Image (cartoon, rainbow, N blue to C red):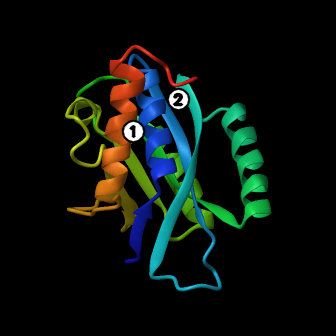
């Protein structure tokens, strides 16, 4: 398994999308450096593209969004290598059929793909640990990765500061 790194930018975008819409399910895709010709031991998620809030479904809008994101990735040397989702219910941390289906679709183009399920309860814990649980494809299903660290202390510190500044202080950070 490759070492996984989630950049500050990607981590903070997931965080901001989830906390901006706490009453909704949200989702998006994670973009990684395309390392076909490089060392395959590291998978670095450099950015993410928030997709939807309110309703998560397998719709024509999702298909169109993924086609546009794929074209953007090709122009920048990235690949779609992950999917993130925060469920609507605070305590719901389970992968649903939408997450599994989109994850399988991403896996068709990137063997080292992951699903990041945002744990809504962790969002209120001052972000002292990663806010998501990660799943990887194994044996025709998705299995949770145990004790996998993907962000640095610096990323957690920046995310905590951003969270406190933008949302605890009443601002919306321009969103």
> In the image, residue 37 lies at what x, y percent?
65, 85
Q: Secondary structure at mark 2?
A: loop
Q: Quadrant of residue 126?
A: top left
Whether residue 132 is visible: no
The tag on residue 119 is none
Left-right relation of 170 to 145: right
> In the image, residue 19 lies at what x, y percent?
40, 26
Per the model, the C-alpha gap separating discs 2 and 1 is 10 Å
Which numbered disc, 2 or 1, marks the residue closer to the eye?
Answer: 2
Left-right relation of 106 to 133: right
3 up-or-down from 141: above or below:
below
Task: Tell me how many marks there are.
Answer: 2
**Which residue is identified by label 2?**
56
Depth order, front residue of 69/167: 167
> In the image, residue 172 lies at what x, y percent?
49, 20
111 up-or-down from 158: above or below:
below
107 up-or-down from 161: above or below:
below
Q: Residue at x 34, y 36 (%)?
A: 161
118 up-or-down from 173: above or below:
below
Q: Quadrant of residue 86?
A: top left
Does label 2 or label 1 sit earlier along the sequence? Answer: 2
Q: Secondary structure at mark 1?
A: loop
Whether residue 89 is visible: yes
Left-right relation of 65 to 113: right
Verify CB contact (< 8 Å) between mark 2 and mark 1.
Answer: yes
Image quarter where the N terminus lies is: bottom left
**Which residue is identified by label 1?**
96
Q: Residue at x 57, y 29 (%)?
A: 52
């Amino acid at each position: 398994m490759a070492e996984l790194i989630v950049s500050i930018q990607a981590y903070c975008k997931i965080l901001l999308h989830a906390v901006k819409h706490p009453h909704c399910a949200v989702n998006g895709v994670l973009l990684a450096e395309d390392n076909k010709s490089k060392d395959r031991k590291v998978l670095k998620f450099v950015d993410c593209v928030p997709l939807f809030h309110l309703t998560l479904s397998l719709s024509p809008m999702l298909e169109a969004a993924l086609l546009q994101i794929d074209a953007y990735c090709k122009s920048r040397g990235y690949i779609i290598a992950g999917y993130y989702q925060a469920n609507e219910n605070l305590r719901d941390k389970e992968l649903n059929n939408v997450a599994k289906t989109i994850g399988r679709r991403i896996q068709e183009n990137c063997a080292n793909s992951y699903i990041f399920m945002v744990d809504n309860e962790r969002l209120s814990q001052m972000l002292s640990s990663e806010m998501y649980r990660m799943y990887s494809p194994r044996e025709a299903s998705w299995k949770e990765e145990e004790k996998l660290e993907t962000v640095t202390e610096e990323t957690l510190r920046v995310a905590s500061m951003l969270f406190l500044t933008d949302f605890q202080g009443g601002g919306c950070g321009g969103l």
